[in-house]
Amino acid sequence: MLNKFFLYLKKIDWILFLAVLLLICFGLAEIYSVALGQGTADLFNFKKQILFSIIGLILFFFLAFLDYHLLKSYCNYFFIIGIVILLGVLVFGKTIHGTKGWFDIGGFGLQPIEFVKFIFILFLAYYFSSASIKINPLKHIFLTGGGLAIFLVLVLAQPDFGSGLILFLFWLSMITLTGLNKKYLLSIVLSIGVITAGLWLFSFKDYQKERIITFLNPSFNSLNQGYNISQAIIAVGAGGINGRGLGFGSQSQLKFLPEAQTDFIFAVIAEESGFIGVSLVILFFAILFYRCFYHLKKINNDFGIFFILSVACLIFIEMFINIGMNIGILPVVGISLPFLSYGGSAMISNLMLFGVVESIIIRSK
């Protein structure tokens, strides 16, 4: 048993693990900085994030040593669990910033949608590994889209539009990567356009319309809907090459930048660490993606291939949207930056995902 343990340790992709660990450390440093600026002497959020990271790392190694085929065999049960916890949070959940999306457990907030992302990746990897999307593509669109719709309805009921957008973009990306015919993709895009127009006319509230208008013109209503984007852009531009130094960012330390620990942590990094710090963050993400794609050609089963591809795709979408929000090229939709933003559920879920990735890598060698 001990020999098997050390054999697994040797087979772990330590470069991938190091990239993840460096991103976590970078995030912890900035969360610490923001906590100081907010005058929280007990550094409660910083300490909680350390705890979440430790729990996540324990689960990372547990899942890395666990045979991932077990997860595949219980995929249907996980899907049901995902539905149950999303229903549960609508009934028993805690409302924060107008979204009923957290369970309050002993003073700690647990956000089920982060674990539903894990479940949805399992669902899609299982489905695509057992079916060819080129044979009867409409069937696969409706079946996988049906799974998406169930989660999407429950998430939008909270309402959590940011997480709903992530689920949809992730699903669309995966069916695209599996080789779906262009005419079907065009049909999906046109359908989205019609639905969006309908929502704009009959469903979107004024503040939601203002967010979209602010995205198209960040200077619009800069003291209200455009305030977040304006302050984030100022913070990003103020960092220069070397940054102002940890704890010396005026936008974050003087509380001009809202949600500095979560949605706008990238702006804090840019202001305090400058171009060098931002470059390091992008480099660590690039290494993470490179190592995922490096192993794809060595994986000997479709489930493993689709799972790793799905994880890389999800992390990239979240990273791209968050950074886009921070530099003003995408609307503010409440998406955190993986491994860097404050949030225990996201941290634990993302580390669990990469634990399964390592399990696939280990068993492919």
Image: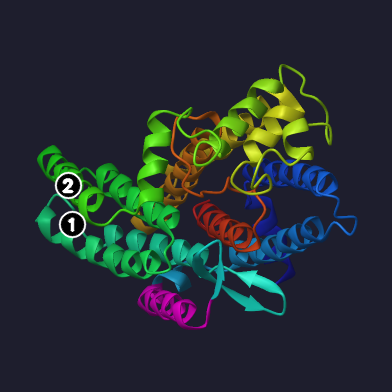
* Residue 297 appears in the picture as rendered: no
Write down the residue under mark 1: 141
- Numbered label tally: 2
The x and y percentages for residue 92 are: 52, 83
Q: Which of 125 and 348 is in front in this view?
A: 348
Q: Do the residues labelled 1 and 2 touch (CB within 8 Å)?
A: yes
Q: Residue at x 43, y 43 (%)?
A: 296
The x and y percentages for residue 8 are: 65, 58
Magenta region, residue range: 73-93
Q: Residue at x 38, y 74 (%)?
A: 79
Type of amino acid under label 1: Ile
The x and y percentages for residue 56 are: 67, 62
Residue 165 is labelled as none
Residue 74, image quadrant: bottom left
Instruction: Name the element at disc 2.
Output: helix
Q: Which of 337 and 23 is in front in this view?
A: 337
Badge 1: how crowded within 10 Å, few (<14), some, or many (20+)?
some
Write down the residue under mark 2: 188
Whether residue 36 is situated above or below residue 345 in the rendered picture: above
Q: Nearer the viewer, residue 78 or 199?
A: 199
Q: How far, Cα to Cα, is label 1 from label 2?
A: 10 Å
